[in-house]
Amino acid sequence: QSAPFGVVSPVKAELTVKELEQQKAENNLKISELQKEIEKAKAEYENIVSDENAKIEYQDILSEKIILQNQNISMVVEQINQIDADIQDNLADINNTEDQIKNQNMMIDANLELYKQRLRASYMSDGDNISAVLAGSTSFLDLLSKLEIVTKVAEHDNNLINDLNDQLQTLKKLNDELSHKQEELSVNLEDATTRKNELNEKLDELNSDYDYTQSEIERLQSEKEETQHSIEETNEIIEEKKKEQEKVDAAIAEVLEKIR
């Protein structure tokens, strides 16, 4: 005989409670699994944030290095410009000294040629000159005086050439010093240019590292947003499961109430 209308059969009610309890257990299991996923996602999120912060800190350090490297390059460029200016000034000094040497050589050649002409004329008419000096002399003292004048003229020409030659040697020495200085400046310029190129290469590496770090930060930010979104979605699923649990608990309570 069937049960009266509105009364739940004990056997049927028992099966229904078992089914509901099984559904409840499955929901609890699912909620537990989802909670583990959230904990895992949170751990990943914290790792991402930690990695992101580390890269941001590293990028800040790179920024400081880039600023300092640019300052170093600016200083080396100033050194190069100064060396270039020194080279130009030194070249002007060398050209000026070479002109002086050229003029000095011309003066020496001219005075030497004049001196040779005087000597040649003196040797060719030495006897006539002495006779003229003797004939024109009024006394022995006058003769000595005239001979001394001739000697002094020759001595003056000789001293003049020696002085010019000394000046020439001084100019040549100065020119050698300027040439040596020019070589040193050229070496300094080459060294400074090499340093500038090395600094530029290092700056390129820093900029490349900075750009790579920036791309990594952007990637981590994207992963962080995805992980955060995943956590929110999982929380929503858990809330739905909890609401289902509440419905299952209510259904179990209703069935048990009917059994009673």
Image (cartoon, rainbow, N blue to C red):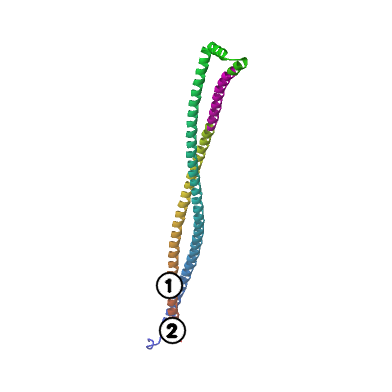
Q: Earlier in the sequence, mark 1 or mark 2?
A: 1
- Residue at image position (50%, 21%) is 114
In this rendering, does residue 96 appear at all?
A: yes
Q: Position of residue 207 (x, y in %)?
A: 46, 52
Front in this rendered view, residue 188 or 22: 188
Query: Is residue 168 found inside the magenta-colored segment of the image?
Result: yes
Q: Is residue 208 above or below residue 3?
A: above
Front in this rendered view, residue 226 or 181: 181
Q: What number is the disc on residue 236?
A: 1
Answer whether labels 1 and 2 touch (C-beta < 8 Å): no
| Few, some or many residues within 10 Å of mark 1 (<14, 14–19, 20+) | few
Amino acid beneath label 2? Glu
Magenta residues, start to end: 147-174
- Residue at image position (45%, 68%) is 231
Q: Position of residue 260 (x, y in %)?
A: 46, 87
Mark 1 or 2: in front is 1
Q: Position of residue 98 (x, y in %)?
A: 48, 31
Q: Position of residue 119 (x, y in %)?
A: 53, 17
Q: Is residue 212 above or below residue 144?
A: below
- Residue at image position (51%, 36%) is 182
* Disc 2 target residue: 254
